Image: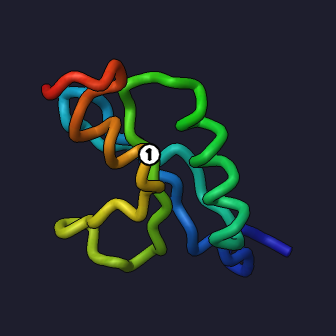
Amino acid sequence: MNDSTISLPWHVIRQDDNGNRYRVGRYATRAEAQKIADSLDARGHKQLYWVERVGQGQSSVQPQAQPQAQAQAQNGVDGTRS
């Protein structure tokens, strides 16, 4: 099997505190990608992690983050408004 036959339609995306977005990895299932995103998010950094399906429309990305991660993104990690 070569790379062209492997389907990895789920991305984990990271957004840093400057708004820059990066693809962290590609995964075969949403569950696998979400597990990685959750483990990275649990580290407590200011970055926001979410799962996105390939071809979902990169220009209008809507994070599918956990409510805790959304609150951290809105309030900052320490709970203060940014």
Which quarter of the image is occupied by the N terminus? bottom right
The quarter of the displayed image where residue 56 is located: bottom left
Q: Residue furthest left?
A: 82
Whether residue 56 sits left or right of residue 32 in the image: it is left
Q: Which residue does the numbered mark 1 point to in the structure image?
A: 68
> Which quadrant holds the C terminus?
top left
Which residue is at a point 28% across and 66% down the rendered structure image? 62
Q: Where is residue 23 in the image (x, y as percent from the top left)?
A: 45, 48
Give how far across and how far down residue 64 sits, in percent.
41, 64
Q: Which amino acid does label 1 sit on?
A: Gln
Tag 1 secondary structure = helix
Vertical placement of 30 versus 38: above or below? below
Which residue: 45% across, 67% down? 52
- Depth order, front residue of 9/74: 74
Identify the residue at image location x=63%, y=71%. 30
Q: In this view, does 8 lie to the left or right of 11?
A: right
Q: Quadrant of residue 19?
A: top left
Comparing 81 with 3, the one in front is 81
Give the image location of residue 41, x and y in percent: 53, 37
